[in-house]
Amino acid sequence: MTDTAVVTTTRKDWVSDQEVRWCPGCGDYSILAAVQMLLAEIGAKRERTVFVSGIGCAARFPYYMNTYGMHSIHGRAPAVATGLAATRPDLDVWVVSGDGDALSIGGNHLIHALRRNVNLTILLFNNEIYGLTKGQYSPTSEQGKVTKSSPFGSIETPFNPVSLALGSEATFVARTHDMDRKHMMETFRRAHEHRGSALVEIYQNCNVFNDGAFERITSRDVRSEMLIPLEHGRPIRFGTDGSRGVALGPDGRMKVVDVAEVGEEALVVHDEKADDPSLAFMLSRLARGPYEPTPIGVFRAVERTEYGDAMSAQLIAAQQSKGAGDIDALLRSAGTWTVSG
């Protein structure tokens, strides 16, 4: 079998021999199934696939994939994965992280992996709570959230993961949710195909410590009125028969409108390929929380030189212009001294 041969697998081939030990009913199960089904569908190779995680419920993911993987340390998955992706461009490197793992102790690693445009597919499981450590508030928990670590209510302003990724100059940013496998698989497919840093925020239910956090927008009976699908090159419409849409108001801010009142020509046309992320950022701020109409899908998908490619090109150029480096000369180039015994 050559390296370019098409591999035929089924979901079963991607399932490891480890017992899945998430709480019954956890949204992580549906995400795991979507990833396993997608990798089989696209003909991915298990020996070329790596999952790197940090700490938390989501971080158990590599155990359940019949691939290479690493359960690293808290918040450091993007750093570990960066080293792997930069030195092994032949691998498909996925990062799996939760909102606490990625946005608290791992926040600095995440934003720099995104701005560098490292070739990583990052899945951010957002359940707005710390699940593994039993229910403390997280960086995405809403203000006023009463938990074991905030008995009088959280006083902190939460992160918006999509806004954060766009502000970090990520070249691919998307959002999906654990109640729609088809949408998850298509979003993961797009992220995987992207060359560079790709972040997908997944609204994921923790039925033990934060049950129903997203049900006001993801429940089957309200989705059409509460989820705003983003389709490149098309006016942003949603609701029954596309009766509602998104337009720019006279104050320059995006707002939800009735199409019959403003006309389709007033609607914002989604452009995921725009080099300037301003409109994508405005879309990410359209909903104040998961209780208002919320955009879902791909916010941004642009091309920029991938970090590993740029690093390799720089090394080759340096070798060609100056020849082999002299480590001894470098160490003695300046500021050296001798310490006598």
Image: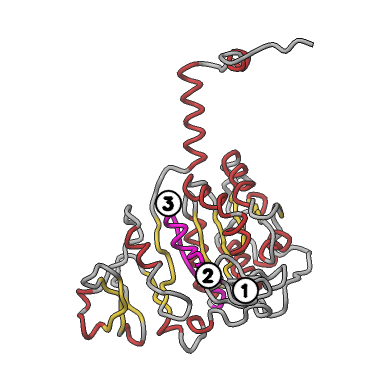
Q: For the point 74% across and 63% down, which residue is it?
A: 16
Question: Going by the picture, which residue comes out furthest to the bottom?
Answer: 221
Residue type at tag 3? Glu
> Which color scheme is applied?
secondary structure
Q: Is residue 5 above or below residue 217?
A: above
Query: Which of the two labelled residues, at mark 3 and mark 2, occupies the earlier sequence position?
Result: 3
How dense is the environment of label 1, judged by Cα within 10 Å: few (below 14), some, or many (20 and up)? Answer: some
Contact (Cβ within 8 Å) of mark 3 with mark 2? no
Magenta residues?
155-179
* Disc 3 to disc 1, C-alpha distance: 29 Å
Residue type at tag 2? Met
Q: Position of residue 290 (x, y in %)?
A: 48, 77
Mark 2, secondary structure of its residue: helix
Quarter of the rendering containing residue 100: bottom right
Residue 169 numbered mark, or none? 3
Residue 196 relative to residue 138: left or right: left
Q: Mark 1 — residue? A: 30
Mark 1, secondary structure of its residue: helix
How dense is the environment of label 3, judged by Cα within 10 Å: few (below 14), some, or many (20 and up)? Answer: many
Q: For the point 51% across and 21% down, which residue is it?
A: 319
Contact (Cβ within 8 Å) of mark 3 with mark 1? no
* Disc 3 to disc 2, C-alpha distance: 23 Å
Q: Position of residue 86 (x, y in %)?
A: 57, 40
Q: For the point 46% across and 59% down, which residue is it?
A: 164
Q: Mark 2 — residue? A: 184
In the depicted view, which residue is nearer to us: 160 or 198?
160
Q: Position of residue 185 (x, y in %)?
A: 53, 68
